[in-house]
Image: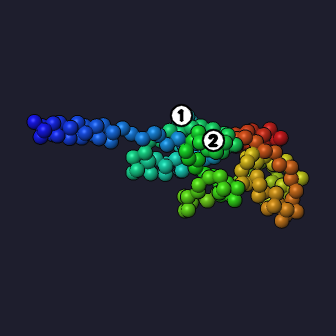
């Protein structure tokens, strides 16, 4: 009788372990904002971009479940700091951010910046920005570094921090 009882307990434990192993872990919450071609929501309102595809490949290999959380740039950083998202692709490293967040050691992509102006505008170089109003993504490393870069060209500008790239493009299109 004790042998049958031991076998029953063993089989019961195996069943419990099997059920526990079958349960999936919580999804990895990934912040996504508009910064094509790296991260953005496509025309079907689905996460897309180079870094999104890379994350999906990693998730497949590691058996992670991804849950994308759309946000605007400054809000994305706030969500990450508050623990409401687990991962935010495409965050440029800075000393302050390195104190607050864990960064990977090898970047998948390096950051870049581009100047957009309304059609017919003569801006073709950084010195041509002198005296202009320039929309920048609020809280971005570029917003912090652009004044120093422009200083080297003797090109002082008025920075207009905005919450999204869409807003910056709309302002440029209207000549604001």
Q: Quadrant of residue 95?
A: bottom right
Tell me the tag on residue 116: none
Please tell me how many numbered marks the rendered image carries.
2
Left or right relative to 80: residue 62: left
Mark 2: few, some, or many residues within 10 Å (few <14, many ≥20)? few
Q: Looking at this view, is 49 or 18 the one in front? A: 18
Q: Quadrant of residue 151?
A: bottom right
Q: Residue at x 81, y 45 (%)?
A: 160
| Residue at disc 1, secondary structure | loop
When the figure is inspected, residue 17 is found, relative to residue 112, above or below; the finding is: above
Q: Looking at this view, is 98 or 47 the one in front? A: 98
Residue 18: x and y in percent read 28, 40
Q: Which residue is identified by label 2?
A: 82
Looking at the figure, which quarter contains the N terminus?
top left
Tell me the tag on residue 44: 1
Q: Looking at this view, is 84 or 41 the one in front? A: 84
Residue 68: x and y in percent read 53, 39
| Residue at disc 2, secondary structure | loop
Q: Residue at x 77, y 55 (%)?
A: 144
> Separation of disc 2 and disc 1 at Cα?
29 Å
First reached walking from the N terminus: tag 2 or tag 1: 1
Residue 94: x and y in percent read 69, 58
Q: Nearer the viewer, mark 2 or mark 1?
A: 2
Q: Residue at x 49, y 49 (%)?
A: 55
Left or right relative to 78: residue 89: left
Residue 139 visible, this orientation: yes
């Amino acid at each position: 009788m004790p042998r049958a009882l031991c076998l029953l307990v063993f089989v019961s434990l195996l069943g419990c372990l099997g059920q526990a192993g079958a349960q999936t872990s919580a999804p990895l919450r990934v912040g996504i904002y508009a910064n094509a071609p790296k991260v953005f929501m496509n025309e079907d309102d689905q996460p897309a971009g180079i870094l999104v595809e890379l994350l999906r490949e990693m998730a497949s290999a590691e058996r992670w479940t991804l849950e994308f959380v759309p946000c605007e740039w400054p809000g994305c950083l706030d969500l990450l700091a508050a623990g409401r998202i687990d991962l935010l692709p495409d965050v440029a490293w800075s000393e302050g951010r390195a104190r607050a967040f864990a960064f990977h050691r090898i970047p998948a992509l390096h950051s870049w910046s581009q100047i957009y102006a309304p059609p017919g505008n003569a801006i073709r170089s950084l010195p041509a920005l002198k005296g202009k109003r320039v929309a920048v993504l609020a809280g971005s490393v570029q917003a912090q570094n652009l004044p120093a870069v422009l200083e080297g060209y003797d090109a002082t500008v008025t920075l207009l921090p905005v919450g999204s790239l869409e807003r910056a493009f709309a302002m440029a299109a209207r000549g604001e």
